[in-house]
Image (cartoon, rainbow, N blue to C red):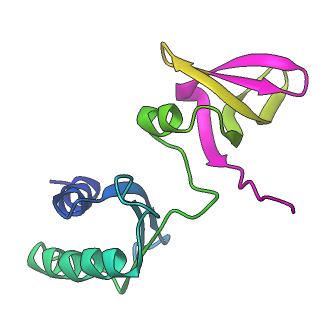
Amino acid sequence: MNLHDLIEKTVAGLGCDLVDIEQSPRGRVLRLFIDKPDKAGGVDVEDCAQVSNQLTRVLAVENVDYDRLEVSSPGLDRVLKKVVDFEKFVGSSINLRLRLPMNGRRNFNGVLQRVQDGKICLTIDTGEVELELVNVDKARLVPQFDRK
């Protein structure tokens, strides 16, 4: 079992979703972002500690060599990677970067309208645009703040 699958299985077993994994260049730091969508307010410090404690034991048993494990919430500007992430946040403002340019453009900011047939539809400043999900390099939510 590869490291990603091992971590995802362990996190899921604790009732959390694995949002993203970041590894330092030499794999010395493992940084995990987890969520608990069915919990009001999302993931909290206790959830992060529980996942960290369990993963520390699992990684020791599996002889995974690392120096530091960090577990946190995905934050307001959470990354969108999986199709279910995009589906969950339809109607939200996102910022994304394409692997290969489309019409000479790689960066898009807009409101996610729908996810269908391996494509996402965004409303941007010039209208609607459809982008292939396989061409998305990075995508993040744009935090929205109430200004009162």
The x and y percentages for residue 43 are: 41, 67
Residue 10 place in picture, x, y as percent: 19, 63
Q: As rendered, which of 30 and 126 lies closer to the eye?
A: 126
Residue extending farthest to the top is 117
Residue 132's place in the image compared with 35, above or below, is above
Measuring 48% from the left and 12% from the top, which residue is drawn there?
117
Is residue 86 rendered to the left or right of residue 15? right
Quarter of image, res 95: top right
Left or right: 22, with 2 as reference point = right
Residue with the most extreme right position = 126
- Whether residue 29 is visible here, answered yes or no, is no
Tell me: residue 3, above or below residue 67.
above
Q: How many marks?
A: 0
Give residue 143's quadrant in the image.
bottom right
Q: Is residue 46 visible?
A: yes
- Residue at 42% in and 60% down: 40
**Left or right of residue 59: residue 146:** right
35 above or below 84?
Answer: below
On the image, the x and y values in percent for residue 123 come to 77, 24
Residue 134 within the magenta-colored segment of the rendering: yes
Q: Residue furthest bottom?
A: 67
123 or 118, which lies in front?
A: 123
The quadrant of the rendering that contains the C terminus is bottom right
Q: Which residues are magenta?
A: 121-148
Q: Residue at x 90, y 21 (%)?
A: 126
User: Is 103 above or below relative to 26?
Assistant: above
Residue at screen point 56% across, 38% down:
89
Locate residue 99, reporting x and y percent: 65, 35
Between residue 6 and residue 92, name the one nearer to us.
92
- Outermost residue to the left: 61
Q: Quadrant of residue 19?
A: bottom left
